[in-house]
Image: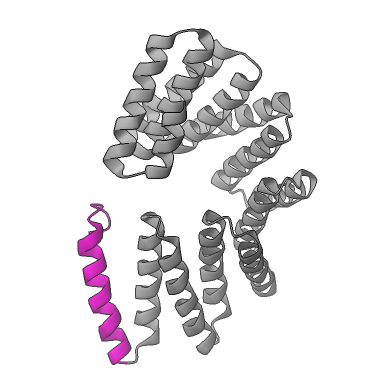
Amino acid sequence: YLKQDEWQDAQRELIQADELFSHFNDPVGWTWVLLSQGNLYSDQGDWSKAIQVYKKAIELYQGRQDRYGEAQVLVNLGAAYYAQANWAEATEAYRQSLDIFLEVGDGLSAAMSLGGLGDILTDLGKYDEAIECYEACREIFAEAQSIHGQISTLNNLGRVNDAAGNFEQAVTLYEQSLALAQQYGDLRSQAIALDNLGVSLNELKRWQLALQAHEQALSIYQALGDRPNMSASLNHIGIVSRNLGNFDQAVAALEEAIHIKQAIGDQRGLASVLVN
């Protein structure tokens, strides 16, 4: 059901499994169900319910003295708090998970926690501290030869520089991320880097190059059937087309983005596109 995006059917089955595992006092099965429920709520953007479920899962892991499992859920909890812009709780969850991952010697998972902390610091405008987190991630991923981790971290470093107004440096980092993603055939990461690159190029008033980047990203998301990100790329295309003076193209792109936002029920994203 989850693979087919049939949320209500998936939730019904998970609730039944939750009741059975609870009845038979099976903490392993119950924890798995809780994680699945939390991830389902997260996918739907219902962060309050996701947080409630993740907290219950953490209690179960603590009861079993499973430190690693606890840390994994803490990362999910941090991401849910981050989505709510609850920086204090998100920071605490990521820091707790980081401490546990370092304690058990899992560097790659520690990098995930560091990345979460970097995201928070970026949004708080603490750019130097955010860069320190991301550079630490970069070292871990390079040592572990994690290509996806390196690609993601280059994007994050680009995002920090974007936020700090260092657009030329951001372009360089996004281009590095894009080249790595192309080398290893990672289409989704290519699209992410292209959209990010387009944003920086737009700030530098290199509008034709920005438009090309966003159109390439859109083409990839269309091939992947990723409608939420298709609408984001279309929104970017609308903004850049307007800057180029191509108002008909801008309106067409924004109207298509609006249609997708309405179809997927993204009210917050819809408001953003309507402003443009």
Residue 103 sits in which quadrant? bottom right
Residue at point 69% right, 71% down? 99
Q: Please indicate whether residue 7 sits to the left or right of residue 150 in the image.
A: left
Predominant SS along the magenta part: helix
Residue 33 sits in which quadrant? bottom left
Whether residue 262 is situated above or below residue 117 in the rendered picture:
above
Instruction: Magenta stretch: give its range.
Output: 1-24
Q: Nearer the viewer, residue 127 or 251?
A: 251
Q: Nearer the viewer, residue 48 or 171?
A: 48
Q: Residue furthest left?
A: 9
Q: Residue furthest bottom?
A: 24
Residue at point 34% right, 37% down? 261
Q: Residue 222, image x and y in percent?
A: 33, 30
Q: Residue 114, image x and y in percent?
A: 67, 57
Q: Residue 179, image x and y in percent?
A: 57, 28
Image quarter of the N terminus = bottom left
Is 54 colored magenta in this rendering? no
Residue at point 56% right, 31% down? 196
Q: Please indicate whether residue 3 sits to the left or right of residue 209 in the image.
A: left
Q: Residue 149, image x and y in percent?
A: 58, 47
Q: Nearer the viewer, residue 226 or 266?
A: 266
Whether residue 213 is situated above or below residue 246 in the rendered picture:
below
Residue at point 53% right, 68% down? 72
**Residue 226 visible to an observer of this rendering:** no
**Residue 52 visible to an observer of this rendering:** yes
